[in-house]
Amino acid sequence: MTDLHDPATFRAALRNWLDENDLTPPGDHSLEGHMRQFARVMRALYDAGWSRYGWPERAGGLGGPAMLRAIVGEEVVGRRLAEPGPYSMLEVLAPTMIDYASSELAAEMVPKLLRGEEQWCQGFSEPGSGSDLASLTTKATQRSDQWIINGQKVWTSFAQYSHRCILLTRTGDADTPNHQAITAFFVDLDTPGITVRPLRTMHDVDEFCEVYFDDVAVDSSRMLGKPGDGWQLAMDLLPYERSTCFWQRIAYLYSRFDALITEVRADGQAVDSDLGETYLALHTLRCRSRATQHRLADGHKLGPETSIDKVLLAGAEQRLYDTARDLQPGVVELDDTDWRTEYLYSRAATIYGGTAEVQRNIIARRLLDLGKE
Ligand SMILES: Cc1cc2nc3c(=O)[nH]c(=O)nc-3n(C[C@H](O)[C@H](O)[C@H](O)COP(=O)(O)OP(=O)(O)OC[C@H]3O[C@@H](n4cnc5c(N)ncnc54)[C@H](O)[C@@H]3O)c2cc1C
């Protein structure tokens, strides 16, 4: 019998299955089209078992090392069957639910996400609280066995397509120390009092939203952890957002690097040192990210060292698209191609998941022990 918990055997079997089961996108390049295709791919992978590997059985998974789920993401996104953005939300939010939701809630909800039945979003940032996340002001007040939430989130990716949100709120009173005053909830986005307003990005896609909460009642059973655990939840979630969730994005960037070489050669240009340096940046990122995947698979807890992964990702992604712009003069500026959209989106790589400056602060203070700002 084949051992599907062995990564090499797993990858070979998955590749065979993907070759035999055509999940090619229908060619709808709108964000709605991408979200529909993502749901279609996830459902097919779940029903065939693939997207359940690498996740614990208590949350609907089929067990095995976390490496297996990284392989699924890499194969699926590398073949451009699904876009990296929605895929990465899964890798950020599901581990947090498994660690912080009650076992009943995790067992009920995580399979819905893995099967593409639902999309979830991350409600952390607010108009006045991005880098300084601990200053968030969205307030949750207890009323018998419910919590009443008031406030506003912003830059909430895919909120308009989402069924649920992992939401950070402020609880406690004025004397509660900041980091003990933050509490997380798992909120249904169809609860009365929630308004979602999409925001248009400069690459012309409504990728993220403002989300308003006006007297939104949430049951106590939807609290993630205990009152005051929200800061620790965020500290546990962000390392995924800064590292493992990019593994499949790296496969995507490699596929774009290959496409760039093909286009450059078709133009009769030489493959020059700019492309060599881009390849080196991508390869360095992949090596670092691979080491992180192995640490996770070996049972290590991810922490501030993932800021290095995030710095490398942002640098490699922006270098790739800078090179694409330099080698195809005018294409980014004047033509309505994927290169233009992706070039513009690559500028966000030094912002989402914590800005490049904030990552460097973490590396300086927490990894190199260089003291406070
Ligand atoms: C594409 C995209 C998707 C996103 N998706 C989500 C999402 O799904 N959910 C969510 O909650 N958020 C999301 N965000 C928000 C993101 O987390 C924040 O934009 C980010 O944390 C920065 O916060 P800010 O925008 O408030 O900028 P600020 O914190 O106001 O920063 C402004 C500038 O000041 C610099 N700065 C701030 N503090 C320091 C410091 N101490 N030292 C040095 N420099 C500093 C920053 O580096 C930056 O250049 C998304 C952002 C983008 C671009």
Image (tube, grey):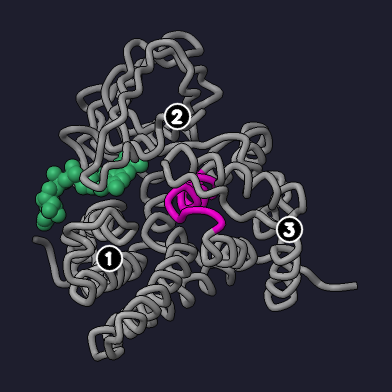
Q: Residue at x 24, y 36 (%)?
A: 178
Label 2 environment density (alpha carbons within 10 Å; few <14, some 14–19, many ≥20): many
Sequence-wise, the earlier of marks 3 and 1 is 3
- Foreground: disc 3 or disc 1: 3
Q: CA distance from mark 1 to mark 2?
A: 30 Å
Please state which of the two labelled residues, at mark 2 or mark 3, is closer to the viewer.
3
Residue 173 visible here? yes
Q: Which residue is mark 2?
A: 185
Up the image or down, 313 lies above or below 85; here it is below
Check disc 2 and report its element: helix, strand or loop.
Answer: strand
Label 3 sits on residue? 21
Magenta-tinted stretch:
81-96
Are circles 3 and 1 on residues that touch, CB within 8 Å? no
Q: Residues within 10 Å of mark 3 (few under 14, many from 20)?
A: few
- Magenta stretch contains residue 87: yes
Q: What residue type is disc 2 on?
A: Phe
Residue for point 37% across, 45% down: 234
Q: Is residue 222 magenta?
A: no
Residue at the extreme left? 373
* Image quadrant in which you'd find residue 70: bottom right
Cβ of mark 3 under 8 A from ligand 1: no
Tell me: is circle 2 under 8 Å from ligand 1: no
Q: Are marks 2 and 3 in contact (CB under 8 Å)?
A: no
Q: Residue furthest right?
A: 1
Q: CA distance from mark 2 to mark 3?
A: 38 Å
Residue picked out by circle 1: 314
